[in-house]
Image (cartoon, coloured by chain):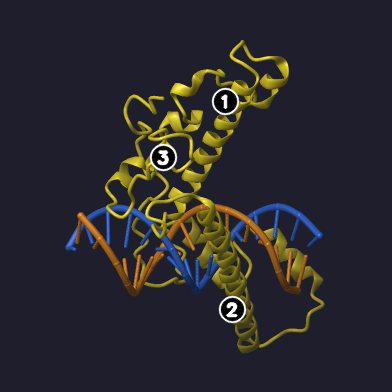
Chain colours: A yellow, B blue, C orange
DNA sequence: TAGGCCATCTGGTCCT
DNA sequence: AGGACCAGATGGCCTA
C-alpha cells in the first residue's frame, strides 16, 4: 500500500500554540494601575491590592457586608495569603505532575524508534491521535477482508462508519484532522535526529506506515 | 545567540 | 471557603 503520496503526512507544523510571551517586562507586579501590560497582569495587580480581583467588586461588597470575620492585622492577612498561595502552588504542581504522568503513560504505549526517543508533549498528543485513528482504520480493513471482498455488508460496515471515510480509502491512512495538516509536527520531527522511522510500527506490513507518519 | 520545550508561579473563574 | 482548572508570565535548560 502506498502510504501516502508525499511520503509524509503532508502536514505542516505551525506550533501556533507556542507563542512567545510579549512584552510584560515589568520587573515586578506592582500596584500601579496605569497602562497594564497584559490583562492577566493587570487583573493580578488589582488582586494583589485587594486580595479579591478587579471585577469582583460585587463579590467584595458581599464579603464586606458579611463583616463577620474579625479584623485581622495586615501582617496576619499577608501571612494567610502567602500560606494559601503556597498551598495552591503545591496543588498546582501536583496536578501538573499527574498530568505529566498520564502523558508519560501515553508515551509508553506509543511505538517510537528508537525506543527511548522521547516525544514532546504536543508530539505525544498528536501521535496518539493519529495512531488511534490508524489502528481504527486497520481494524476496519481487517474486518472487511474477513467479510469478503464484496461491498461491505451491514455488520461489517458498522465497525467504522463514524468518521465518514470510505472503506477502501486506505490509500490515505490519516485521520481527517491530520490531513488538515495543522496537527502534526512531522516537519519538525524530521529535523530531529533522534527520532527515526521504524520499519513497521504497527505490524501492518513492511513499510506500511512510518513512525513519522503518525505525527 | 535565538528558539523550543518545560516547570513553576500566579491570579482569575467556576464548582462543591 | 477551599479546591480544581485554566491561561499568562517567567526563567532555566538544551540544541542548532
In this rendered view, identify the residue nearer to me: A124 or A80.
Answer: A124
Residue A183, quarter of the rendered image? top left
Q: Are marks 3 and 1 in contact (CB under 8 Å)?
A: no
What residue did someone put label 3 on?
A: A184
Spatial CA span between label 3 and label 1: 24 Å
From the image, state whether disc 1 or disc 2 is nearer to you.
1
Which residue occupies 47% across, 29% down? Answer: A173
Instruction: Tell me which label, 1 or 2, sits earlier in the chain.
Output: 2
Q: Residue furthest top?
A: A150
Badge 1 element: helix
Badge 2 element: helix
What residue did someone put label 2 on?
A: A86
What residue did someone put label 1 on?
A: A141
Which residue occupies 44% across, 29% down? Answer: A180
Badge 3 element: loop
Instruction: Work out whether A36 lies above or below A126.
Output: below
Spatial CA span between label 2 and label 3: 37 Å
Amino acid at each position: 500500500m502506498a502510504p501516502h503520496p508525499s511520503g509524509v503526512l503532508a502536514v505542516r507544523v505551525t506550533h501556533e500554540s507556542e507563542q512567545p510571551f510579549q512584552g510584560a517586562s515589568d520587573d515586578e507586579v506592582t500596584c500601579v494601575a496605569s497602562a497594564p501590560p497584559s490583562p492577566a497582569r493587570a487583573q493580578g495587580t488589582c488582586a494583589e491590592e485587594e486580595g479579591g480581583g478587579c471585577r469582583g467588586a460585587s463579590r467584595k461588597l458581599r464579603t464586606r457586608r458579611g463583616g463577620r470575620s474579625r479584623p485581622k492585622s495586615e501582617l496576619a492577612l499577608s501571612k494567610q495569603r502567602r500560606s494559601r498561595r503556597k498551598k495552591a502552588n503545591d496543588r498546582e504542581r501536583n496536578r501538573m505532575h499527574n498530568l505529566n504522568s498520564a502523558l508519560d503513560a501515553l508515551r509508553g504505549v506509543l511505538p517510537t524508534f528508537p525506543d527511548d526517543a522521547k516525544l514532546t508533549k504536543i508530539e505525544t498528543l498528536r501521535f496518539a491521535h493519529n495512531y488511534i485513528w490508524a489502528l481504527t482504520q486497520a481494524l476496519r480493513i481487517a474486518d472487511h477482508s474477513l467479510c469478503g471482498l464484496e461491498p461491505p455488508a451491514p455488520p461489517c460496515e458498522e465497525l467504522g462508519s463514524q468518521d465518514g471515510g470510505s472503506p477502501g480509502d486506505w490509500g490515505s491512512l490519516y485521520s481527517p484532522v491530520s490531513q488538515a495538516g495543522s496537527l502534526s509536527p512531522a516537519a519538525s520531527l524530521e529535523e530531529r535526529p533522534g527520532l527515526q522511522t521504524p520499519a513497521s510500527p504497527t505490524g501492518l506490513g513492511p513499510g506500511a506506515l512510518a513512525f513519522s507518519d503518525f505525527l
